[in-house]
Image: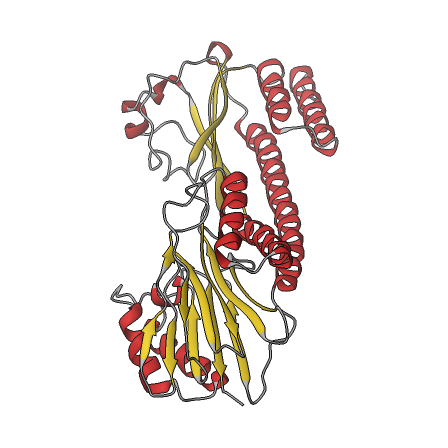
Amino acid sequence: MIDAAILKRKELALNSLLEITQAINNNLPENFLYRIYNFILRGNLNISKLALYVWKEEWVLATHFGVDLRHLTFHNDLFASNIEIMPPNEAQRQAGYDIFDVVIPILHKHQVLAFVLATGVANEEVDTDFMQTLTNIIVVAIENKRLAQEQLAQEVLKKELEIAQKVQNLLFPKSLPYNEHLQVKAYYTPHSSVGGDYYDYIPISDDQFLFCIADVSGKGMAAALMMANFQASLRTITRQTTKLIKVIEELNYLIHENAQGENFITFFVGIYHNKEKTLNYINAGHNPPFLFTADGKFRRLDKGTTVLGVFDPLPFMEETTLAGLSNFLIFSYTDGLNETLNPQEELFGEERIEHFLKHNYQHNLEQLHHNLIQTLKDFKRYTPYNDDITLLSLKHTAP
């Protein structure tokens, strides 16, 4: 005949499992699940002292009762050897865990997810098998819930990035001129799904066009959103004025107001006049583009002002006009190019860019970009890119 006490205990155990299962199915928060867990252990299993540690990249105390753990010594390796139910070992006792009767590992697919330290009421023996089962159910349920939430968050982020990527692609010109007199070519690769680089080509009239390249401090979604706002502002301002100093002042004011000093933008902008054969430009803290003329001479386009968004008004401003330009190449880029590292942590650097261009500037622009990116890949080898990379080249040939 079955002992009434044993029967009662099994009934309590089944009811406890049912209660925990219902709580899990009702999708209760983690802290509520632990409250129910503690109540069951105190009321149904006569546990007087408990500490539950769960692995979350390190051992974290998930819940406890009946004991002050502040004076105990704890480190991640203290319970690493616990793969079987057993009393605290010598190291654990010396660390102060001799107040517990038993250490119970909680395994899932041969991996230790948690361990329970417990002591029964009035030295009553702990039902370790049931306690292991109950804890396993709740810990695995919480872990599955966490993984599901992470997956959902990743799916939401992925969707947001897809939308941001589509929006960002709309920022760039749908087509760039490529004829016998004017050839414009761009190359862009973001560090992640979206980035903070931007380039543009804007026809102003039959006689003039504007071209520019920019880079937002930072990376990812925030940089992409800031650049989207910058592009919209530039397009609006250039419909009102093509005076470069005015364009820069307006852009700087808007960035300063919106970013509140937390981000800045480096920016190079130029306007070429076909009939006058002049180039007007302002460099706002950007990597100076290279200008190659038909006679093989080159110069850096480095005059202008500081980065946009830090000071308002800007501390200085200079617009440069270059006259007599008819046959020339302008090569511009963002700092993801020159700051690429190789395995020895050397920068690709501006000197390598200059050396490459001096030996390749006469190639067509597509070949120029292809050869440069291949040179960069050979340099960096297996080292990952650490920033967005944008190239914008413009070649003009007089009729």
Left or right: residue 279 versus residue 35 is left
The answer to whether residue 348 of the structure is visible from this angle is no
* Up/down of 16 relative to 307, above or below: above
Q: Residue at x 45, y 39 (%)?
A: 261
Q: Residue at x 35, y 61 (%)?
A: 303
- Quarter of the image with the C terminus is bottom right
Q: Residue at x 65, y 51 (%)?
A: 160
Q: Nearer the viewer, residue 396 or 52?
A: 396
Left or right: residue 79 versus residue 246 is left
Q: Residue at x 37, y 86 (%)?
A: 360
* Up/down of 257 relative to 381, above or below: above
Q: Residue 375, how many percent across, how many down?
A: 36, 79
Residue 24 figure quarter: top right
Left or right: residue 90 versus residue 9 is left
Q: Residue 138, how many percent across, how many down?
A: 61, 32
Q: Nearer the viewer, residue 48 or 85?
A: 48
Q: Nearer the viewer, residue 184 or 105?
A: 184
Residue 383 figure quarter: bottom left
Q: Residue 371, how many percent across, how many down?
A: 41, 83
Residue 179 figure quarter: bottom right
The answer to whether residue 208 of the structure is visible from this angle is yes
